[in-house]
Image: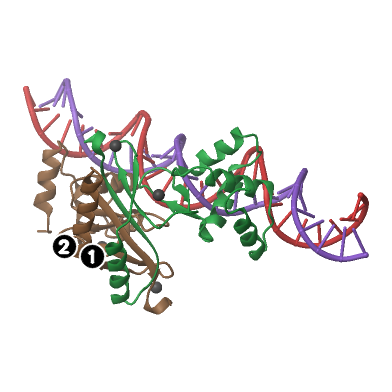
Chain colours: A brown, B green, C red, D purple
Amino acid sequence: MSKGLNRLKKILHHEGLRFTTQREAVWREIISSDDHRDADEIYMAIRKKGVSVSRATVYRTIDVLVKNNMVRKLDVGTGPSKFEHKIDTYHHDHIICIQCGRIEEFMVDQIEDLQDKVTQEYGFKLVRHIHQLFGLCKNCQ
Amino acid sequence: MSKGLNRLKKILHHEGLRFTTQREAVWREIISSDDHRDADEIYMAIRKKGVSVSRATVYRTIDVLVKNNMVRKLDVGTGPSKFEHKIDTYHHDHIICIQCGRIEEFMVDQIEDLQDKVTQEYGFKLVRHIHQLFGLCKNCQ
DNA sequence: TTCCTTATTGAGATTGAGTCTCAAAGAAAT
DNA sequence: ATTTCTTTGAGACTCAATCTCAATAAGGAA
Ligand SMILES: [Zn+2]
Ligand SMILES: [Zn+2]
Ligand SMILES: [Zn+2]
Ligand SMILES: [Zn+2]
């Protein structure tokens, strides 16, 4: 039994949505890798495995997953958004190589705390944040 | 004499580009306000002032300005990118209201330092960063 | 100034990611 | 089986942004 499948079922039920072959396939594909992939890569991977699905359904399902905190959307500055599952992971942000596209993950508690603090100072209620460091990786310098 | 005009001329000259009415108009429009505006808003504002310019030229000119550090590009998560001039300003990041689009600017030295540190740890050379806090402003909570 | 070369401009076509439409298929309920 | 409601998918569409290319403008030379 694939990780998070029950959680997916619960979410769908809670949202009044049905558990379908396509939705299951999208989730299984996303959970099958820790990479940061775009919607089209996920779509192609599902097709390659013989499951019939459309791009529209992939996008729609990813939306549900992102809204329900099972998947994270990652805007890498150029090209399509990338997605990663959030099962068995901690919150992290990204360092992205502007030359080769390599992505590393980082997490600094102190930065997270300072974010909360500054948001409060401005009277905002923090919902989410984007923190991306763009630069050149070891190989590309 | 508009702020930064000489700098613009130097940059254009250095890049082997010509100083044209359109490029001057784009710069003057961007420098005329501290708002965060998108390319189309800037385009419309220039037209309204009677200068003939095309969208293509606005985009092309903004590219030059961004590359040469006179303008900052700001991806606000949805819709077109926004731009702000960098004359007489310090580096800052943004808090964005996901309800009404309001944008506040913040700057925390400690966060900037921690960013440098974490980038070095990963062997990257930091070129730029995006740090955006999305949430609900006082009015929208 | 005039001439010449090269860069720039702009209208509209194109791209690319993502969303929408709507008829057909599928699920659940009675 | 019938009805009702949801989901799917092919392709149309949107929107920001980029590209094309003929016409125009800038800057240099003389
Ligand atoms: Zn690299
Ligand atoms: Zn990640
Ligand atoms: Zn607000
Ligand atoms: Zn700003």
Residues beneath discs 2 and 1 located on the same chain: yes
- Residue B49's place in the image compared with B119, above or below, is above
At x 37%, y 55%, the residue is B92
Tell me, yes or no, whether the two marked residues, 2 and 1, touch with CB atoms within 8 Å.
Answer: yes
At x 13%, y 62%, the residue is A88
At x 55%, y 55%, the residue is B65
Per the model, the C-alpha gap separating discs 2 and 1 is 10 Å
Q: Is residue A26 visible?
A: no
Looking at the image, tell me whether mark 2 or mark 1 is earlier in sequence order. Answer: 1
Q: Is residue A12 left or right of residue A41?
A: left
Neighbour tally class for label 1: few under 14, some 14-19, many 20 plus, Cα within 10 Å: few
Chain that bears disc 2: A
Name the one closer to the observer, D20 or D6: D20
Chain that bears disc 1: A
Name the one closer to the observer, B29 or B42: B29
- Residue A82's place in the image compared with D23, above or below, is below
- Residue B115's place in the image compared with B65, above or below, is below
Q: Which residue is mark 1?
A: A34
Q: Which residue is mark 2?
A: A89
Residue B72: horizontal and vertical position, in percent?
A: 46, 54
Name the quadrant of the C terminus of chain B: top left
Residue A84: horizontal and vertical position, in percent?
A: 25, 59
| Element marked by disc 2 | loop
Queried on whether the Cβ of the residue with tag 2 lies below 8 angstroms from ligand 2, the answer reads yes
